[in-house]
Amino acid sequence: MTDTGDLMAEIEATGERLVQAREMISRRIIGQESVVEQTLIAILCGGHGLLVGAPGLAKTRLVETLGTVLGLHANRIQFTPDLMPADILGAEVLETGADGTRAFRFIDGPIFCQLLMGDEINRASPRTQSALLQAMQEHEVSVAGQRRDLPAPFHVLATQNPIEQEGTYPLPEAQLDRFLLQIDVDYPGRDDERAIVLATTGVEDAEARPVFDAGSLISAQRLIRRLPVGEMVLERILDLVRAARPGSGDAHADVDATVSWGPGPRAAQALMLTVRARALIQGRLVPDLDDVAALAHPVLIHRMALGFAARAEGRTLSGLIATLVQDTIDREAAA
């Protein structure tokens, strides 16, 4: 079989597994199709996701279900203001042996897992938040002067409550940029909420079974990087990211007037990966402009900031990104 034939067979097999995975997830997560899709995209691309939504919208349940379906060892951390870096990373303790000798032994923190849920990450102090930076970027931590590798694959799915901001510590730009996607979790529609109430207030709760394991998930992540991306899609990705960057020659007029800082090259890298994953999840071999338009918001929203004057005028980043998509992608697709 040719290399192309091998690739096609691998794409088909992975696509079938992804269909099964979404079926399993839908047993426990009713509605929220775009949230499930974007979370899967983040993991398939080997990245991390920031889930932003009000309490009670099944964010924790989603992460628990993903751990089961993807066959990953999952841990959960409830972030609080008094949480210390050692509570996440682990620490060395001095132990006395039976013969009276003493030695330090390292006790793993909850970060030593494959899928870490950071619940209400913005409630932790900046010092504790920064403990995640090295882990999220380099997949290793430094404790007591020693580097320790994290399990592979390693993903962080953090949640954030956008309503109650008292006593919180906003994530710095450097850490926000570590998240591949910001996934906005909205309230369900009436029919979905009715189904949720019926499904979760009975005697039995739906169960999910593993579809992937760590090895097959890593293979899928490698496959994503092998999927072809057309020249037109690449050019529109560059157009979109550069249009969102104030002060550059390619910046959109609205961006220069309203945005204080914009996305760097990591945003273009994120779009190149995520459009491939979305195409594969939807059973397509090649991404198109619809994928770029669908992922523009979750890729860009946490990598931009409005200036004070724009916020005072009631401008929003969501509205600005919609304008950029309309001007750089939708018109190209129509042509």
Image (cartoon, grey):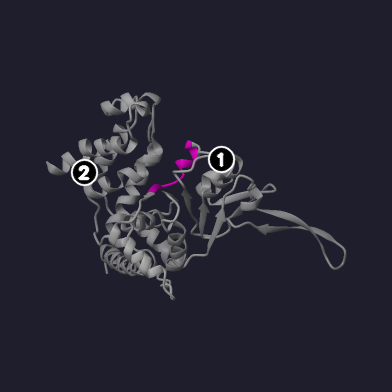
Identify which residue, 20 or 207, lies in the foreground. Answer: 207
Residue at (21, 43) in percent of width and height: 232
Query: In this picture, is 53 found above or below 236?
Result: below
The residue labelled by disc 2 is 232
Residue at (39, 67) in percent of width and height: 28
Image quadrant occupied by the N terminus: bottom left
Q: Residue furthest bottom?
A: 203
Alpha-carbon distance for marks 1 and 2? 46 Å
Q: Earlier in the sequence, mark 1 or mark 2?
A: 1
Res 250 seen here: no
- Along the horizontal axis of the image, is 160 left or right of 7? right
**What residue span does the magenta drawing correspond to?**
173-183
Percent x, y for residue 263? 38, 35
Residue at (43, 51) in percent of width and height: 47
Percent x, y for residue 277? 32, 55
Hey, what amino acid is under mark 2? Met
On residue 262, which mark appears?
Answer: none
Hey, what amino acid is under mark 1? Gly
The residue labelled by disc 1 is 167
Image quadrant occupied by the C terminus: top left
